[in-house]
Image (spheres, rainbow, N blue to C red):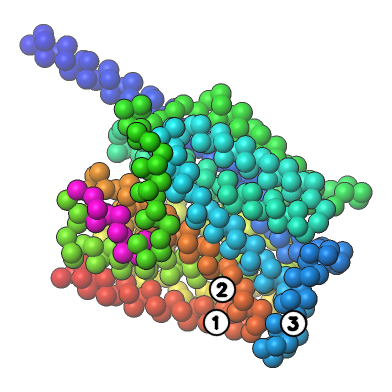
Amino acid sequence: MKEFNQKGGMSSEMGSEEAVGSSRVIKSVFFALLLDLLGFTLILPLLPSILDHYGQTEDSVYQSLQSIVDWFREAVGVPMETKYNSVLFGGLIGSLFSLLQFVSSPLTGAASDHYGRKPLLILTTLGLMSSYAVWAVSRSFSMFLLSRVIGGICKGNVSLCTAMIADLPCPKARNKGMMMVGIAFSLGFTVGPLMGAYFAINSRKEEVFYHGPAVLALVFSAADLLFIIVMLPETLPKQNKVSSVTSGIQESGDLLNPVALFHFSALTRTEDPPSKEKMQNLKVLGLVYFTYLFLFSGLEFTLSFLTHQRFQFTSMQQGKMFFFMGITMALIQGGYARRIKPGHHIRTVQNVAKVTFALIGLAWNLKMVYIGLILYSFAAAIVVPCLTTLVSDHGSANQKGTVMGILRSLGALARALGPIVASSVYWIAGAETCFIISSTSFIIPLVLLRRLGGLKQE
């Protein structure tokens, strides 16, 4: 009996130490990710004004690109609307940034499986610091593009922070950690754009307006680096590290191949792969997830250009718009989303109003815009978490990482394609047509979800 009590006491003590260690990791990852996201989101309300700035200063690279666009527009017979060129350039920049993330994130993850999470997080943060430094000193469009390229290649912090949470031994701790990651995103995307707009408006007259936000982004990134070095523990045990980087990179090839992604090929090569029926469900969910994010990211990206051109929104008004959306999403996530009962996720996603984007595209006064933004915030707060939950229910315990890795890559690919496609439609046909076509396209994932719902009911 005494021996039993000793064993029980030892087990309880180990569990307590494990809980304390997990709590420390969760808090550290939360603050590291928050600092990263605050720096990343500062530019969001400024992008339309930055592109207008380069157009007005007659930057040689910008003018060369605009000449090519004008020639193509004349060749295909599209009416001349120079103001829409900035939307197209913005879409190209947004898609380029996300495409570089799509390529670099699996490689960064594979390297972290061998070297550890913390060294790679330090390396990517140093890369982000260099991108913000280039942005701060940039006085030409080519330098601004260079800063976005460096940032896209080095933007692996979110994936690495998620991997650190996934390394935690206790499922309860992992769930709590993922919730804290969501809170960091909500705070970052709510406060960051407003801060960026504030520092842009209050910049000194002798400085270009985006210099203050760029320096602030550099400060946030430097603080993040210091915090990671001093406070963030390594979460990947030595015995769990892969033997070589090469093997990890070979496995990450499945995450860079779009065909393999949509077929969840990496999952079929694991031990005891899911049944044919479950694989079919996963393929449908993956396609639905990609389609939703493709449409959402495209329209989300063009939204700031719409308000800038139609309602002459300043950077501060753009920041307030993002703040309003962030607060609305946080309230919905904290109030409604977490109360969705298991098994009701498909129905909830199906009920999200597809008129949201049509309403914003047709809006000719701010009241209509903000009604549309409330509906948009509801959709954004509900759809991705519900679909993520549905996908996470598939696969055994040792297959969860593979399943979620494929899902993240599908999301990155959708964000790489969405902005350029939406901005191209905006450029060719105008805002109303762009938003109406995209809104109508939501029928596709809705039809797929009904098919999935039928499979689940059977």
Residue at x 73%, y 64% (from the top left corner)? 48
Amino acid tagged 2: Val
Image quarter where the C terminus lies is: bottom left
CA separation in Å, label 1 and label 3: 27 Å
Q: Which residues are magenta?
A: 261-271
Q: Earlier in the sequence, mark 2 or mark 3?
A: 3
Residue 122, picture quadrant: top right
Task: List the residue tagged with mark 3.
Answer: 71
> Which residue position is annotated with label 1?
436
The residue drawn where x is 37% and y is 55% is 254
Asked whether 268 falls inside the magenta stretch, the response is yes
Q: Which residue bears the numbered disc 2?
A: 421
SS for tag 3?
helix
Q: Quadrant of the N terminus?
A: top left
Q: Is residue 176 visible?
A: no
Mark nearer the viewer, 1 or 3: 3
Q: CA distance from mark 1 to mark 2?
A: 14 Å
